[in-house]
Image: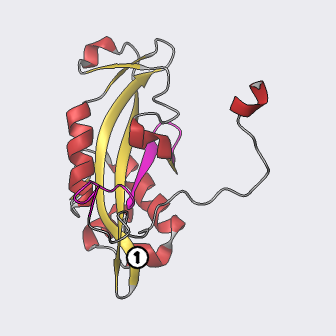
Amino acid sequence: MKDFFEKKNDGAKKGSGFTILSGDSTGGHGGFGIGALSLDNVTPVIVDTEDSVAYVDMGALHARSEVEKRIKFTPDRSNTPNPRLYWLVWVTINRSEQGPYYYGVTACEMQIDSEARRGYKSLPEHVNRMDKSMKGHVIIEDMDEKSRRLLGNFLRDHDEAMFERSSDTVKAMVE
């Protein structure tokens, strides 16, 4: 029975992790679930400025990204003794006649001390920024230049055509 609960690695190639517009979650029936919020188009990207890396971590949709696991978060920055800065970036994909593009990009700060197992984040900010991303806003002003450039390069390298179809604000991240 133990094997049932263990994760299996079948050697299959993992996808890019980006979620690009899936079908209608209600199947068009108009009944239960109508008006429910759909996260089908939202992808969380973690930007680690210290290691100069950006990557998709779908666990962040439920506050369970690798960097968030086993961390007790508080809304008080002083409770994190040796903070390491991470950015959780909500990236929403939309589709135009030309194809998919980065529609909304919003960043939220997280400070984590994994040794002390403590961290700072503002849950209301994370929820509000996810909502803003889904509505097509680009809110990255809080990020330092290095973090914005890491994010911009990651998005461009992921799919250059999708990046080129995006707004000038999104494209400005790599300039």
The relative height of residue 144 versus residue 38 in the rendered view (above or below) is: above
The N terminus sits in image quarter: top right
Q: How many marks?
A: 1
Q: Give the amino acid type for the residue marked by disc 1 in the picture.
A: Pro
The C terminus sits in image quarter: bottom left
- Residue visible at 34% across and 51% down? 90
Front residue of this view, candidates 157 and 104: 104
Q: Is residue 53 left or right of residue 7?
A: left
- Residue visible at 27% across and 14% down? 78
Query: Residue at label 1?
Result: 100
Q: What secondary structure is the stretch in magenta mostly built from?
A: loop
Q: Is residue 130 left or right of residue 69?
A: left
Q: Is residue 163 left or right of residue 140?
A: right
- Residue visible at 41% across and 24% down? 112
The relative height of residue 82 versus residue 127 in the rendered view (above or below) is: above
- Residue visible at 23% across and 17% down? 76
Report x, y in % for residue 60. Answer: 43, 40
- Magenta-highlighted residues: 31-54
Q: Secondary structure at mark 1?
A: strand
Report x, y in % for residue 145. Answer: 33, 50
Counting other residues with Cα less than 10 Å from the Cα at mark 1, is it few (<14), some (14-19), or many (20 or more)? some
Q: Is residue 9 magenta?
A: no
